[in-house]
Every structure is written in structure tokens, then in C-alpha cells.
Image (cartoon, rainbow, N blue to C red):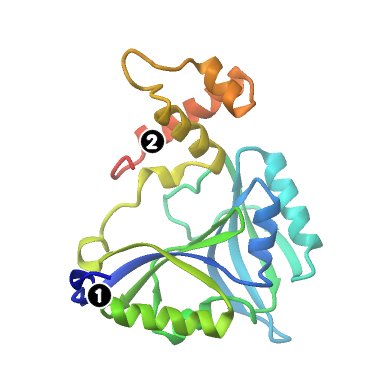
Amino acid sequence: MTDQDRNFTGKSQLTLEIWHPDCWTLQVTEESSAGLLAHTVFNTTNERVKGHFTVYGDTTADIDDFIAATERSSLTHSVAEMQRRHGLGDRNPPGNTSRELFVEYDPDNSMSDALISQDFIQAAPVRVFDGRELWSLFIDDNRDGIQRRLNTIREMTDAEITVTKITCADTTVNRVASRSDELSGRQREVFELARKRNYYSWPREVTTRELADELDISKTTLLEHLRKAEAKLLNSEGPLL
């Protein structure tokens, strides 16, 4: 850690990548092609909680598989699908399609209480995909203090926590989220490979057939993912990446 890091003070905004044991959202997203946005949690009877989630994916089959896996999980008690979306504003979830769920489960292995106990404040819905959670949080402390708080949480929960981003909250609190957050996991993979292989350079250094072969998908499927990714990136507000 540099002297500049140690002197970083004031309100900060962090993005944390978290894995922790016995979490149904991590287990199900690790097995599924779909992802999850966690919004709010309500207390219920029998010391359980009911969470409001958006499940998103490239296809309706991805979402059907996700819901079925959630219902089978030994870590969940009930799953109810909502027919209409409530309280999510104008922002669209990632992916091509999505559904709203209420899931009832035991709160013992949730990270929420541990983060709150160390004065972290949730700044946005938690995004869960590929067996990991991405938390956007505010904290009023310097970097040494933040590290101590995170170490305390690691000891409390046996969690693996990685800080992927930290900035001064004053410069980020009103900032529009990255456009790439609108992409599903598959769309992001295809778009990033196209950029890496200089598909968007002039002249192009790779063909769509070569990209499709590298991803082991058809050329039609690749073009569909690229078109949808490009449309979301061009129509969203905020910085491109």
C-alpha cells in the first residue's frame, strides 16, 4: 500500500467481489447461465427472510433453469414468481429477458448483517453471477480503516472478499453506472473478445467466422450477441466502459 493509499480519507465508494459459504444465490448462479440482482429483503416468520430478486438471462430457458435450481436448493424455502415489476425505476436489468422473484430463505449466511455491522452502506442492488456477488457500498473511512473492517468481516463470515474498485464517493455518488453493466454475461464475453481481436478496428483484423469458431458458436449466434450488445452500449447513458 502506498502513502497515497494510506492518506485516502473521507467517504468512499467500493465495489467488492464476495464469495461466502452456504449461499443459495452463489450456488445457483454458479450452476446456471442466468444472473441475479438482489434488491430488498423483508423479515418473515420462523426467523426467515424473503428477498426480492430479478433473474436475468439471454433466453427464457436460462431463467426457467435458474428458477428450477432455486426451487431444488436445500438453502431456500419457497420461490414465488411475480408477474409485474415493482419499484425498479427505468433502469433495465442485464440480459435479453428477466423475471421478478420472491425467495424465502434463512438469513444466517447472508453478508448484509456483517457489512452493516462494519458501517458499510449498500449503494445499489447486489449483482450475482457465476458464483460471486458484486456489492457497491459506501463507507466513511480511510483505506487502512476499510481494510481492517473487511478483515473483521472475513473472520466473521469465512468470506473471500476482493476490492475491485475504490473511489472518493463525492465524485461517484451521482455518476451513471457503466454501460457495460447492461450486458448479459454471454454478451459481454462476445463483445470483449471482438474488441480484443480488433474486430472494431479498420480494417478489421478478424472475421465473424473466426470469432464464432473461437467461441464454438454459430456465426448467426455470434452476430445476434454482438448486435444486442452494441444496441445496449449505444442506447445506454454514461461512460462506454
Q: Work out whether residue 150 or residue 103 is closer to the camera in this orientation and state it.
A: 150
Q: Position of residue 54 (x, y in %)?
A: 58, 56
Q: Which residue is mark 2?
A: 233
Q: Work out whether residue 211 or residue 1 is closer to the camera in this orientation and state it.
A: 1
The amino acid marked with disc number 2 is Leu
Which numbered mark, 1 or 2, is in the foreground of this view? 1
Dot 2: element: helix
Q: Quadrant of the N terminus?
A: bottom left
Q: Which residue is mark 1?
A: 11
Q: How many numbered marks appear?
A: 2
Where, by quadrant of the figure, is residue 121 drawn? bottom left
Q: Quadrant of the C terminus?
A: top left
Residue at screen point 53% across, 29% down: 225
Q: Position of residue 57 (x, y in %)?
A: 61, 44
- Calculate the distance from the C-alpha at mark 1 to the C-alpha at mark 2: 30 Å
Lateral position of residue 220 relative to residue 241, left or right? right
Q: Which mark is residue 70?
A: none
The amino acid marked with disc number 1 is Lys
Q: If you read the primary sequence from the N terminus, does the residue marked by circle 1 or circle 2 appear first?
A: 1
Rate crowding at label 2 as few (under 14), some (14 to 19) or many (20 or more) other CA atoms within 10 Å. Answer: many
> In this picture, is 18 found above or below 119?
above
Where, by quadrant of the figure, is residue 156 drawn? bottom right
> In this picture, is 139 found above or below 229?
below
Dot 1: element: strand
Rate crowding at label 1 as few (under 14), some (14 to 19) or many (20 or more) other CA atoms within 10 Å. Answer: some
Q: Position of residue 46 (x, y in %)?
A: 73, 86
Residue at screen point 39% across, 78% down: 120
Lateral position of residue 58 relative to residue 67, left or right? left
Lateral position of residue 148 relative to residue 238, left or right? right
Q: In this orientation, does residue 140 appear?
A: no
Q: Position of residue 167 (x, y in %)?
A: 26, 64
Q: Work out whether residue 72 or residue 219 is closer to the camera in this orientation and state it.
A: 219
